[in-house]
Amino acid sequence: MLNIAYTLHQWYGRARPFALATVTDVSGSAPLPVGSALAVDTEGTAVGSVSGGCVEAAVYDLCRHVLAHGGPPVRTRFGYSDDDAFAVGLTCGGEIEVLVQRVDPAAEAHLAAALEAVLAGRPCAVAHVIDGPREFLGRTLRVSDGGPHDGILDGTHDGSLGGANEDKVVAAHARALLRAGRTARVEVGGEADTCPTRLTVLVHTHAHRPRMLIFGAVDFAAALSQAGRFLGYHVTVCDARPVFTTRARFPHADEIVTDWPHRYLAATETDARTAVCVLTHDAKFDIPLLRSALALPVGYVGAMGSRRTHDRRVDLLREAGVPEEQLARLHSPIGLDLGARTPEETAFSITAEIIAHANRGTGLPLSHGTGRIHPPAQPLPGLAGVGNPWNAGSVQVRVVV
């Protein structure tokens, strides 16, 4: 739902009820990921998408029905139809599950704070119960990183259904996913002492933008900063030479820093989503910087240079005491083999490798492969996504009661 926060926030401001359809599970080559949403208001206005177009009309009609008649949430499954590929189903061959529910802004006031946080660029998560006892289904909880949570999962204010414990357990899972920048399904509960009710919860997250740290104020950095910004990164360009690190040269960077690269890296904040791109071509910058970067739990470390430069760089890093398991994390020469020559082409080569590495892609042409195009998201340790295989070749609608 957070992907359509702007419009939902407007509807909240007008106290306008709406129906919310949320993708709660995907299988095969489903076009959109878990957490994608479509909403329809009382005037019939629609925003968002759950399938990229395949089943939007059917979901829209279901939203109008739920909005008009109320009642419990409706769980809908769409899959490929073997008999008629153009029936109400996914022509791509994937399968999705969608939960449709009515949302009344007056009854779900805590979601307004979540929508406001998204629009202000603040980290926020919404935990959404998508399976469990009827009284929990569709309930939501707003969670901030390090702050309090609000919303009551069981819908009562006295904890009569055990919601106080469920709130705490779900909030803890949501904060972990928020720190990782992941939207995912989690199973919680089943423990008599801490959380007796077993629930499946979809945690929607809006995290800080991941960071791309570009070291080396060169023409390639200018193109890469633009590509990184386009992909949603918070881009920093850092170089020790002030004559080159100027706003005029890097208009697309969020931050421009004049400092020794290794010193800046040691002082700045990084996490598992951070991409470190070393474009300096100078051992006095590269070696201390890469030595530090490879020891950090960042998502990606790449360094530009020829194969000869790479071989010499690796020798110097070994001499500096960098262990082999850390050297194995280095992407050098940086980028995928696209035959790139210009700075702009090279920027696409680098970002393509970052995307492939983050999603465990092969980097090969899709026409040369087999199997599913969209692999399932990798679960976090202790927060594994819940598998739910469906019968292939079917389109099913089931009302949850």
Image (cartoon, rainbow, N blue to C red):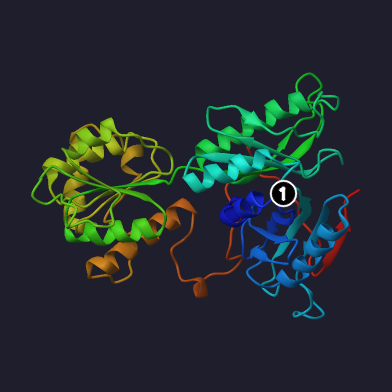
Instruction: Name the residue at 56% across, 33% down.
Output: 144
Give the vertical position of 240 relative to 66 (above or below).
above
359 displayed left or right of 15: left
Snapshot quadrant of residue 259: top left
Instruction: Name the residue at 45% across, 42% down.
Output: 208
The residue wearing badge 1 is 387
SS at mark 1 in the image: loop
Q: Residue 164 placed where, x, y %? A: 75, 24
User: Do we see residue 332 in this rendering?
Assistant: yes
In front of the other: 36 or 114: 114
In front of the other: 185 or 9: 9
In front of the other: 378 or 205: 205
User: Do we see residue 55 in this rendering?
Assistant: no
In the displayed orientation, state which residue is furthest to the top.
Answer: 193
Q: Residue 90 placed where, x, y %? A: 71, 71
Instruction: Name the residue at 55% across, 27% down.
Output: 147
Instruction: Name the residue at 36% across, 38% down.
Output: 325
* Amino acid tagged 1: Gly
In the displayed orientation, state which residue is furthest to the left.
Answer: 243
Snapshot quadrant of residue 141: top right
- Classed neighbour count for the residue bearing mark 1: other residues with Cα under 10 Å, few (<14), some (14–19), many (≥20): few
Give the vertical position of 168 relative to 390 (above or below).
above
In the displayed orientation, state which residue is furthest to the front.
Answer: 14
17 displayed left or right of 382: right
In front of the other: 221 or 307: 221
